[in-house]
Image: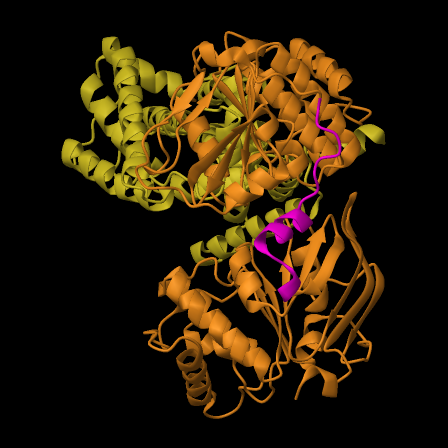
Chain colours: A orange, B yellow
Amino acid sequence: MTGSSHPVPVVEAQGVKVSFGAVRALAGVDLVIRQGECVGLVGHNGAGKSTIVNVINGGLSPHDGTLSYEGEAPGRYGINSARGHGIRCVFQELSLCPNLTVIENMRVMHRALSGWGWRSRAAAAIKGKLDEIFPGHRIDRSRAVGDLSIAERQMVEIATAFADVGQKPKLVILDEPTSSLDASLAEQLLAHIRAYVAGGGSIIFISHILGEVLSTATRIVVMKDGRVVADRPASEFTQQKLVQAMGSVVAEKRDARAVRAATSTAPVLSLPLRRGRGLPFKAFPGEIVGLAGLSGHGQTDMLVDLYLSRSGNWLQRRKPEVAFVAGDRGYNGTFPLWSILKNMSVASLGDLSRATFVDEQHEAELGDEWKRKIEVRTQDMENGILSLSGGNQQKVLFARALAARAPIVLMDDPMRGVDIGTKQEVYDILRSEAENGCTFIWYSTEMEEVCICDRVYVFNAGAIVAELAGNDINEENILAASFTEAVIGEAVA
Amino acid sequence: MNALRSLSARPWIWSFVATAIVWLVTIMFTGGASAAGLSQAAFTFAAFSVIVGIGQMFVITLGPGNIDLSVPAMITLSGTVALKLMDVDNSLILPGLAVAIGLGVAVGIGNFAFIKLLRIPPIIATLSMSFIVQSMAIWTNRGIRVKPPAMLADFTTSTIWGIPNIAIAAFVLSAIAWVLLQKTVYGRWISAIGQSIPAARMAGIPVDGVRLATYVLCAVLASICGYLLASFSGGAALNMGSEYLLMSIAVVVIGGTAVAGGDSNVPGIWGASLFLFLVVSMLNTYGLGAGIRLVMTGVIIIAVIMVAGGRKRGRS
């Protein structure tokens, strides 16, 4: 059973396009997965890896283009149709039910486990797979998944996907499967993948750890901005070439703003080492400091901790020290019941009130001023905040932070889902505010934005692992630094 | 027509409509004989629910999970302690009120200390607090019924131009509450916290300070209610607060305050309080037994909530 004896590919996607509102997630992707190959899928956050995977497993319908399983187009897109063709998925965000036991979770994923005695059949199947993939594991199958450690949960999820109950899996999609496994478990998994592929199975392997991809994949597909930019056998890549293929050098470097001589002045902000590792953090007045690295490596946590430690939880400070622009609007950004105006003014109520009474006329004036400045597209600031598009809601959050007149503004990847026009407007506002002495600390998952910053800290596993400034800020350096591990207790630089 | 439509979009209008219907039905049965008496009684008894209900409304506005179940015990404790302290002496009326308010502040702080320091959900924390408070009331009272000072008893039971004094007091308190909610920074803050605690915190709102103030406010309003209720009914009794547990929550819900938090409503509290009193008197007038009366009360409350809940949520 080799690829050549089975010319029909397991999955074939042609010209697949998907967009979410103004954001184009996939701009015409062709991807073919044949039998007996492990395709490594790499690219930045937001390159479209997860989106194409969701199209293949039936979670998303392509807005344009075609998809076929084993040569036939599915009558209806959907998870069931994909599973019917033997496609299984292991997600990055674990998708097991935490209140059910390992065995019960098997039943959820495998409908074939029905009728009398499904428990014992499920128990045997999951035990067999776990023993096969992770020999020496000590997972109790009758425990609730929520009681297992995150690594054990990941192992169960992987074993569940590979389990053969009534129907053999033909294509297993692994999205960051090793992110919560330690080195030895990861090696066991990679060995299993190689054996599985040699036996004729297919794998889509997504990982940010390039070494793993190079050693395991037979073919590597590089994605960028919703397109496939390289698709070649793994043997033709090296780590260096892979990084180059993933990154685009920013078209034109901004007129090299001299690295601020600000280092001579006192920093407005300095933090000790995060978790006792890596480098210390400093920010100087009028600086735009970028936080880079792979998503979920502690950037947001640092911003939130910074904010909480510098604002009162019991009493409000007279002058706000910090302001925050949320990236996850629904979680810590907007107030859904309120008007645009109230959402905007909430952080500046101290300025707008006399003897605790809100001066509504003053508030309306402030609203009009910022509406003009950042061009919020609405007829009336009294309209509900949810009447605005995502990008405009984001502008309101920017206005909220800037109107608070805090000397430090923290930004938690605020450009997620914002279209390019709005981005340009906001970049200009940032520049002019920074020239007025405001300090911005900006976490972004977009390389272009990080490259606008004056100085960049790169995060890995909760700690700062590198500091880049001036012309050293480029995609290659940032990517390379993202994969370095922090040294424990490194001397303060 | 337009005015009618904008009026029907107000969440509080339904409790007033229901009140008017129940009032008319009751008056029709008695042939109009008791219209004035019934209205006066309704305003007097509704006033107590209004005072407690406003406090509960502030707490519920803080968002899902926030509720104060120590309200009935607070009413009993402040009534007993204040009356015992005043000891029928007219000159101690104001000190008595001050002590009642002081007790409210202490219990409010205690409630939030349980919630915050011990990380207990409000429903459990305030319920535990209510056992402590009720025990304190039993310990102070020891079964003796102290009469209120004559002046205070007079004040609480008399009327000005036909309007009960108690209702006027409740009206003043609700006007203050309305201003607090609509016009001040504090009002903005509790509405923001009710919509999203993380968003409120990251917008610079001192979340824990505001929550503490709100639990204290609720306990203080309950203790004022206890003070007035004990004076009105000629002495404190250990079960005097018990009916206000359900009542304080029911008037908030029927009055159109969002149970999910963030959106409160003062006028609705009045409508709901009058309505709940009138339903009971209507069923009494019709001479129904106690069992049927309770069942009917429950059914009518559910019906009103369904009608009021069917409308689109008015958002401001």
Q: Is residue A245 magenta?
A: yes
Vertical position of residue B268 compared to residue B161: above or below: below
In-image side of A153 versus A12 (left or right) = left
Measuring from the top left, give residue B44's x and y in whole percent.
Answer: 47, 28
Q: Quadrant of residue A60?
A: bottom right
Locate the C terminus of chain B and report the quarter of the image it occupies: top right
For residue A367, side relative to residue B206 (left or right):
right
x 78%, y 82%: residue: A8
Residue drawn at 79 percent across, 23 percent down: A380
Rendered location of residue A194, percent (x, y): 54, 75
Span of residues in magenta: A234-254
Comparing A171 with B206, the one in front is A171
Relative to residue A151, is residue A195 depicted above or below?
Answer: below
Residue A1 counted in the magenta span: no
Q: Residue furthest bottom?
A: A116
Measured as percent of width and height from the top left, residue A146 is found at 40, 63
Vertically, is B226 above or below A159?
above
Is residue B46 at least partly visible in the picture?
no
Foreground: B8 or A431?
A431
Is residue B176 or residue A84 the one in the foreground?
A84
Q: Residue at x 66, y 40 (%)?
A: A416
Of the 4 image quadrants, the one containing the N terminus of chain B is: top right
